[in-house]
Image (cartoon, grey):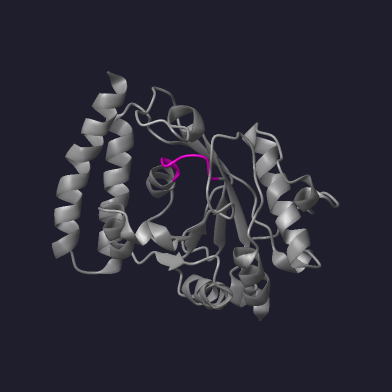
Amino acid sequence: MYGCYAWAALIIVVIPCTILLCITPGIMRRRRLVRASARLVCWLAGSTVRRTGWKLPPEYACIVVANHSSYLDGIVLTAALPARFAFLIKREMASVPVAGFVLKQIASEFVDRRNPTDRHRMARRLVETAHKGWTLAVFPEGTFDETSGLSHFHTGAFAAAVSGGLPILPIVIHGARTKMPSGVKLPRPGPVGIHVCDPLNPDDYGSVAALIGAARRALLAHLDEPDLEPEQTAGQPPPQAPALASPTSQRN
């Protein structure tokens, strides 16, 4: 009964949101509309997103990396993050009815991870977008399945952070796997939330691999799930969180 109710709540919110997106001018207005709709869906489903951890300052340019365990992850992040965030997501999502349209309307970026040229292009786009203050949130695992745990990270977002001098902001999504795991069509009752970890300054790490390891350790410290790729986490513990600074001030 709860699962049917949750789907009904989603449909009731998504239909007017999709219609309004067709006539709403401006990316920021459309992003605010989608964010408000995501928050409303979570509230109607009895799962208002709880937020803990580091307080994200206004206009803080960074690359967000989050664990990926459920189709609900995008809704949870959209509800929790400021409206200036959009997503870097696999190209297959662009053809998904409604979801693909919504993602396009908020200027999300789609990437074919199997195409090296496309991956390099998107790395440049990550830097350009973040420097404009429109930060992209990335699921570095790329996909999810029934297996509980943090799987292998793709390197694109971390390489872009190193080349562009952009902080990595790890965010842990809680509750989404329990609420709607892979292979389940009806969501279950339960809370959802995010924990914002301290930002990671790429200048504090000697390589992309070291930055990936630091991000994985930060996520695993709050995730309460196993590490499925321990070789990516190997290395020294991350240093203290960097002082708040924009990428521009870091470069200057």
Comparing 5 with 239, the one in front is: 5
Give the overall secondary structure of the magenta segment: loop
Q: Is residue 153 left or right of residue 84?
A: right
List the single residue furthest toward the top.
1
Q: Residue 84's quadrant in the figure?
A: bottom left
Comparing 22 with 132, the one in front is: 22
Q: Is residue 204 magenta?
A: no
In the picture, which quadrant includes the C terminus?
Answer: bottom right
Q: Is residue 186 left or right of residue 238?
A: left
In the picture, which quadrant includes the N terminus?
Answer: top left
Q: Position of residue 233 (x, y in %)?
A: 77, 49
Judge whether residue 243 can be spotted in this image.
yes
Kindly identify the residue that appears in the image at 58 percent across and 74 percent down: 116
How many numbered badges does the structure rendering display?
Answer: 0
Q: Position of residue 192 (x, y in %)?
A: 45, 32
Q: Is residue 6 left or right of residue 124?
A: left
Provide the residue span drawn in magenta: 68-73
Relative vertical location of residue 124 with respect to residue 11 in this rendering, above or below? below
Q: Position of residue 134 (x, y in %)?
A: 43, 67
Judge whether residue 241 can be spotted in this image.
no
Q: Residue 93's quadrant in the figure?
A: bottom left
Q: Position of residue 246 (x, y in %)?
A: 58, 69
Kindly identify the residue that appears in the image at 50 percent across and 70 percent down: 130
Relative vertical location of residue 10 with respect to residue 31 in this rendering, above or below? above
